Image (cartoon, rainbow, N blue to C red):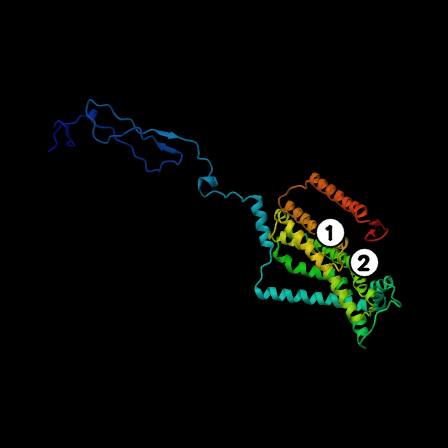
């Protein structure tokens, strides 16, 4: 039962009533949650047990304010904005998005379309060539007439063995050959249009240079075969039997077949720089690899020139091998320019000037040796050296 002194019935730890001055201060609790910018210092402890009469009263917990937290960054692992990818990665993504992706049947359909367009171009050039057949035949037969005249054979004419030879050669085969040469830029453009969708955007910019250079080298190879290779080879081959009581009788069919083989063969060989450039574009070879293995390429070129050259003369051998070697190094130079473009580097003009000077001195040295040792002399037309 509560005593009059202690109406609530509370007792002190000693058993007596608790005076009002001995009560432990009540701890105020707040329903609100603490601010995100406030924390409690845990170095202070709070004892909820009743304090002894002689003990001090524990202070309430202290609230310390801190500045707002810094914004989250991608490195902190938070959910902030992601850092944009580097410029190179964005460019590669854009280039890959620009690449055309199609199925196998789609590739076949595209190939059929390009071949059909090629044939249309060749047919148009063929119709144009038909109107100049007689003039074209005079140009094609000029090397044979010149070779027969040089050998002293009169009249310098070609022979028709069968009734259909003249019609087949002059009115069908010859316009077809001329049409291929005339439509070569269109054909090469269609080849590029078929390959270009699988390349990057930067690499597609080479379309115009590719078509112009390919067509130019193809025509240049045909001109080299017509004015140099075919004329010298034909004179040698027809002159083999002159001293053995053999009179040359050249069929126009055989002559034209040989003319086509030599002309187209050398024209295709002159596409060597384009082939090297394409292999570098597709990352199959590099200029460093080509330079390090150039001795094997030169050896193969010399062997090929020895097989093609109809005479055992060293001068004629070099006449065939030298342009091929020049074309090989021209292809390496073109692939080097492509690599510099990819790596955003500039062209080392000092090295190029030194190499050009060495090549010029080498050419002059070979000409001096040909004149002084092998008794050649200069002439006003190709090949500018003769005995």
Left or right: 142 in relation to 318:
right
Density class for disc 1 (Cα within 10 Å; few <14, some 14-19, many ≥20) is some
Q: Which mark is residue 23?
A: none
User: Tag 1's secondary structure?
Assistant: helix
Looking at the image, the residue that sits furthest to the front is 244
Looking at the image, which residue sits at the far bottom? 163
At mark 2, the secondary structure is: helix
Tell me residue 308's x, y (percent): 72, 59
Q: Are marks 2 and 1 in contact (CB under 8 Å)?
A: no
Image-quadrant location for residue 123: bottom right
In percent of width and height, residue 215 lies at: 74, 57
Q: Is residue 353 visible?
A: yes
**Residue at 70 percent of width and 65 percent of height:** 117
- Which residue bears the numbered disc 2? 227
Of residue 53 and residue 39, the one placed in the foreground of this image is: 39
Q: Quadrant of the N terminus?
A: top left
> On the rendered structure, is 14 left or right of 117?
left
What residue would you read off at disc 1?
322
Separation (CA) of disc 2 from disc 1: 16 Å
């Amino acid at each position: 039962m509560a005593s009059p002194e202690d109406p609530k019935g509370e007792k002190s730890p000693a058993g007596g009533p608790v005076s009002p001055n001995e009560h432990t201060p009540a701890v105020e609790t707040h329903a609100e949650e603490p601010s995100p910018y406030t924390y409690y210092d845990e170095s202070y402890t709070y004892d909820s047990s009743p304090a002894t009469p002689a003990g001090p009263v524990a202070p309430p917990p202290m609230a310390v304010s801190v500045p707002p937290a810094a914004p989250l960054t991608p490195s902190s692992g938070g959910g902030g904005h992601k850092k944009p990818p580097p410029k190179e990665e964005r460019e590669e993504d854009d280039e890959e998005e620009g690449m055309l992706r199609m199925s196998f049947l789609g590739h076949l359909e595209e190939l059929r379309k390009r071949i059909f367009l090629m044939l249309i171009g060749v047919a148009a050039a063929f119709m144009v060539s038909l109107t100049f057949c007689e003039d074209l035949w005079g140009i094609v037969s000029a090397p044979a007439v010149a070779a027969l005249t040089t050998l002293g054979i009169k009249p310098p004419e070609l022979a028709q063995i069968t009734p259909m030879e003249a019609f087949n050669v002059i009115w069908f085969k010859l316009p077809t050959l001329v049409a291929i040469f005339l439509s070569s830029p269109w054909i090469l453009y269609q080849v590029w249009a078929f390959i270009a969708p699988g390349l990057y955007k930067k690499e597609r910019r080479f379309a115009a240079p590719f078509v112009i250079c390919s067509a130019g080298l193809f025509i240049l190879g045909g001109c080299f075969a017509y004015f140099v290779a075919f004329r010298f080879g034909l004179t040698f081959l027809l002159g083999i039997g002159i001293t053995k009581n053999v009179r040359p009788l050249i069929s126009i069919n055989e002559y034209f077949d040989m003319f086509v083989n030599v002309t187209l063969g050398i024209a295709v060989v002159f596409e060597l720089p384009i082939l090297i450039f394409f292999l570098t574009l597709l990352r199959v070879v590099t200029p460093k690899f080509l330079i390090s293995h150039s001795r094997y390429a030169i050896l193969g070129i010399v062997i090929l020139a020895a097989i093609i050259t109809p005479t055992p003369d060293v001068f004629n051998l070099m006449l065939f091998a030298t342009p091929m070697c020049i074309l090989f190094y021209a292809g390496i130079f073109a692939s080097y320019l492509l690599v510099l473009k990819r790596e955003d580097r500039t062209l080392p003009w000092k090295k190029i000037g030194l190499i050009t000077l060495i090549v010029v001195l080498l050419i002059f040295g070979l000409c001096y040796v040909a004149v002084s040792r092998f008794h050649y002399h200069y002439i006003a037309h190709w090949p500018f050296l003769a005995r």
